[in-house]
Every structure is written in C-alpha cells, then in structure tokens.
Image (cartoon, grey):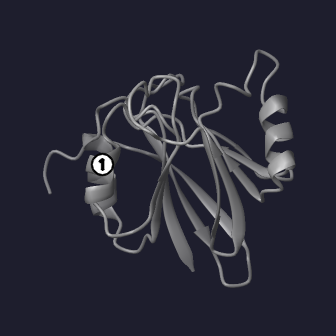
Amino acid sequence: MKKALVFSDSHGRLDNLLEVMKQYKDYEAVFHMGDIEGDADRLRRATPYPVYIVRGNCDYYGDLPMQIVTEFGGKKIGLCHGHRYLNYNGVDGLRYWAMEQKVDIAMFGHTHVPFLDENSSPVLLNPGSISRPRQERKIPTYTVMAISEDGDIEFEMCEYKKRFFS
C-alpha cells in the first residue's frame, strides 16, 4: 500500500500542514496543489519523501510548474491549481484537461472547498484548504490517498482540528 498526503491552498501558513505530516508515519509522498506562497522549500525540508508542488494563482515568485504529471503507486496523476480550468459551470474544463493528460487521478485546488468525484474517469480530487477553508463549517481539510498493490484507490477526506496537547 502506497500512501500520500494531499494538500492545497496553505497561503504562507504551513503550520497546520506540518502538524498533519507529524501525525502520519506511513506516507511516501506529499502533493500540494498550489498557493503555497513561498513555503515550497520549507515543505520540502520537512520530509524525506518526494514533494510535488504546482504554482497557484497567488504564487508570484519562484519557479513552480503550472502542472505536473507523475506516477505514484502505479497510477498516473495530474496536478494543477485549477484556476485556469475551473469556471462557474464547474469542473468540465478541468476534466477535459485531465483527459488530455491521460491521467487516472486529477488533483486540483483553488476553490478552498473539498471535492471528490470517484465515479468519473479520471477521478477528480480537491483536498480543500489546509489553512483558509471556505466550505460551510470553515474547517481546514486535506486528503489521504492510499493505493493498494492491486491498484485500488482509497481517499480519506480529512478535517484538521488543531491539537493543543500532544
């Protein structure tokens, strides 16, 4: 089983994300969908595992790529922030981009609202925002993705609640 942590929209406030990483001992990669605002190197230094980060619409400085297509756990994964593909009609533009990339999973951010469509091909995933959530209850969110040896994919959509005592 290969496990990855998926984040988006930390907006220069990496503390929640780093706290989540401490809670998991068995992940093998970190995916960040952008709007990290200057914290890319800090995130990379926080883990020995591969870190994939794309540029968001608020990432003005640095050389982050606009999109990444990579392989993890035998699945082809596409990452983008989403601001170039989302519109008021929903995720159709993003789905078209993902189909062009021939990915199994398309990850995106930008909306600060968690979203998972496992019934489409490719699967569409937005982990929400780890720092500035916009969904109804305004709780920071992230996703744990696990891919089994036989290719089954599980997504756990998680809420982050600050722990005051360890």
Label 1 packing within 10 angstroms: few (<14), some (14-19), many (20+)? few
Q: Quarter-wise, where is residue 145 in the image?
A: bottom right
How many labels sit on residues?
Answer: 1
Name the foreground residue: 54 vs 149.
54
Residue 84 percent across, percent down from the top left: 69, 25
Residue at x-position 78% and y-position 59%:
104
Helix, strand or loop under label 1:
helix
Name the foreground residue: 56 vs 60.
60
Name the foreground residue: 115 vs 70.
70
* Residue at the front extreme, as displayed: 63
113 vs 84, left or right, is left
Residue 149 percent across, percent down from the top left: 67, 84
Residue 133 percent across, percent down from the top left: 45, 27
Q: Amino acid at mark 1?
A: Asp
Residue 63 percent across, percent down from the top left: 44, 39
36 vs 145, left or right, is left
Residue position marked by numbered label 1 in the rendering: 41
* Residue at the bottom extreme, as displayed: 149
Q: In the displayed structure, would residue 55 be above or below residue 28?
A: above
Residue at x-position 51% and y-position 36%:
55
